[in-house]
Structures are given as structure tokens and as C-alpha cells.
Image: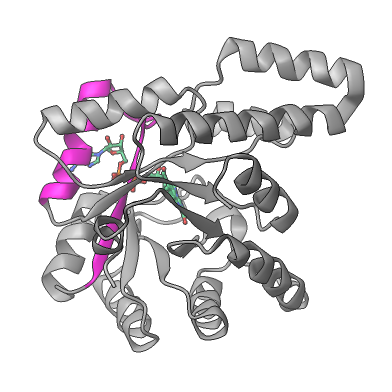
Amino acid sequence: MNIAKLIAQRSTPFCSVEFFPPRDEAQWEPFLEEARRICELKPLFASVTYGAGGSRQDSTLDMVIRLKKTFQLEIMAHLTCVAASEQRITDFITQLQAAGVDNVLALRGDPPHDGAVDWTHSPFLHASDLVRFVRARFPHMGIGVAGYPAPHPESPSFSSDWRHTVGKIREGADFVVTQMFFDVREYFSFVERLHELGVDVPVIPGIMTIQNFESLRRILSMCGANIPGKLYLEMEAAHERGGAEAVREVGTRYAVEQIRRLLDGGAPGIHLYTLNKSALCLRIAREAGLL
Ligand SMILES: Cc1cc2nc3c(=O)[nH]c(=O)nc-3n(C[C@H](O)[C@H](O)[C@H](O)COP(=O)(O)OP(=O)(O)OC[C@H]3O[C@@H](n4cnc5c(N)ncnc54)[C@H](O)[C@@H]3O)c2cc1C
């Protein structure tokens, strides 16, 4: 079912979970065991990333089909369109539909850095082009898009990013899943701006738990999210006091607090970037009152 409709039917906050496909075959069984435990959260849906972090794009489809069959979950497949042909997009969604998958997260993706592919002549320059294409060819598909509480790093301004998010909704997207963020005020202000611009679709906040300094650095350098100074200082102090384990503890507690504040402030639910780690997810959900 379309995820926006599922959300509309809920009277209590939900969680959804995001998986990334393991890189090689040997990791599939351990992954499925982690996924089985994560499903104890009874997620409203599970999403599967596409070609992110070096995974093969075929693995997305394999995993989507496997998760659907094994756990009978509502699944959302991520799909990037940068440098893609219309045929490849059509084939991918046709296969999703054949597997009973009703939702896709329509993304642009990141253009290849090495310049090996000239994507500037692609029919899809922005996620909005993908949304328009999917909406026209597959009218019954649920379509989600990415949203950025702190603007996307390529955006010249907040307002330009808000306008483009609205553009994706106008092209036919049904809901928004946000990039990770660490200051809940950024989420509420983003939702408010979208309302002011006439958009009223569900905006699901994406929650990433910082597990170490390396991931913190990656976040700061790549995705444009801001780290509150207080959190950074707390992590630094924890690192000096108790090393990696203490940093992980601060990150986990921070995620729990963030979820509580989001739900308390009226967010419809949360989208948990699971890192494919069940113990972490179950702890967070339990402490945040989602289990
Ligand atoms: C929830 C979530 C899940 C993700 N999952 C994946 C994944 O599975 N695989 C992966 O590779 N990446 C993933 N990403 C990362 C994403 O691909 C990158 O952030 C990418 O750089 C932008 O994708 P987008 O869909 O937001 O692009 P767009 O919406 O196209 O936006 C990109 C930039 O262009 C601007 N823009 C948008 N539309 C227009 C327009 N019509 N005209 C001019 N400018 C415009 C925007 O303001 C922004 O600055 C994910 C991101 C999020 C938030």
C-alpha cells in the first residue's frame, strides 16, 4: 500500500527502518538474522538503499525481493536516476511491482566524481524528473522523496532547497523522508516552511546514530547536516574519558533523546537508519518508548 496512506491510517507514532544491501553473498545470512531482529520493532515499512556506499545496484532489487518474501513487510526501494536511462528505470520499477512492492524513494543520487560518465544529457537531471516520469508511467506507485532540514550541500540557499522540495511534491511525490539531522528545531522549521509553501504531505524525520568519530567526520563533510557544538564537545570529552565505547554511548543516548523530542513535538514517526545493527536499533526503540 502507498506509505502516505499507511501513515494516514495511524493514530500512534510509527518507526520505519532503512537497510543497506550487504556487499557480498556471504554476508546475506547474517544480515537476514539482523533484519529479523530489527523487525521486532514492527516497522511501518522497511527501505533498502540503492547503490549507496559502494553496494551494487542489483543487490537492492535482490534484497527488496528477499525481505518482502521472508518478512511480508511493506518495502520501499530507493532508486537513483543520475546517469540512468528511461529503460533502466522502467525495468527496475516493473520488477518491483512484480514482487509486490508499492513504494519507491525517488532520488537523484550523486553524480560520479571521476567524470567517467557524462550525465548532463541524461533525461533525469534532478529527482523531480524521476518523480514526474514514475508518476506518469506507474500511476499507482507510492513515491517518496528526500528532504533536507539543513539544505542539500549543492543548494545556494535554504529557500531554493525548499522550493525544489515543493517541486518534487507537485510533480507527484506522496511523502518526504529527511536527511539525517541533529537539531530537532531544523526538522520542525523545515516542516513549517513546507506548510507555508502549501505542502501538507507526511515528512518522516531520518534518525542516524553517531557511532564513532569517523562517521561524524563523514557526516560533516558529505551530507550537509550540522552537528550542534554541545554534542560535538560531549563526544570529544567522552572520547578522552572512555574511548570509542564512550563515544558510542553518547551517540546512542542522543538519538533516543532526539526521537523523544520529535515525537513529542508532533512528528508522525521516525525513519531509523539501522546500519543493519539490531542490538542498537532495539535499544534505541525501547528507550525512546517505541517498543
Ligand atoms: C532519505 C535519503 C535517502 C537516500 N538514499 C540514497 C540511496 O539509497 N542511494 C544514493 O546513492 N543516495 C541516497 N541519498 C543521497 C542522495 O542521492 C543525495 O543527497 C543526492 O546528492 C541528492 O539527491 P536528491 O534526490 O535529494 O536530489 P534533488 O532533489 O535533485 O536535489 C539535488 C540538488 O538539486 C537541487 N534541485 C532539485 N530539483 C531541482 C530543479 N528542478 N532545478 C534545479 N535544482 C534542483 C536541490 O535543491 C539540491 O540542491 C539519500 C538521501 C536521503 C535524504
Report if residue 159 lies within the magenta region: yes
Q: Is residue 170 visible?
A: yes
> What colouring does the structure picture have?
one colour
Stretch of the chain drawn in magenta: 141-170
Pick the residue in front: 226 or 113.
226
Pick the residue in front: 123 or 255.
255
Residue displayed at 14% across by 40% down: 199
Q: Is residue 26 above or below residue 10?
A: below
* Quadrant of ligand 1 in image: top left
Pick the residue in front: 2 or 160.
2
Residue displayed at 55% across by 15% down: 228
Residue displayed at 16% across by 40% down: 166
Residue 3 in the image: state x and y as whole percent: 31, 62
User: In which quarter of the view is residue 256 placed?
Assistant: top right
Pick the residue in front: 61 or 58.
61
Q: Is residue 253 above or below residue 166?
A: above
Q: Is residue 7 above or below residue 216?
A: below
Q: Is residue 162 above or below residue 171?
A: above
Residue 262 in the image: state x and y as whole percent: 43, 32
User: In which quarter of the view is residue 10 placed?
Assistant: bottom left
Q: From the viewer's perspective, tell me whether residue 235 is left or right of residue 126.
A: right
Q: From the viewer's perspective, tell me whether residue 95 is left or right of residue 248.
A: left
Residue most extreme to the bottom: 98
Residue 66 in the image: state x and y as whole percent: 55, 82
The N terminus - image quarter? bottom left
Report if residue 254 lies within the magenta region: no
Residue displayed at 72% across by 78% down: 25
Residue 56 in the image: state x and y as whole percent: 57, 68
Q: Is residue 150 visible?
A: no
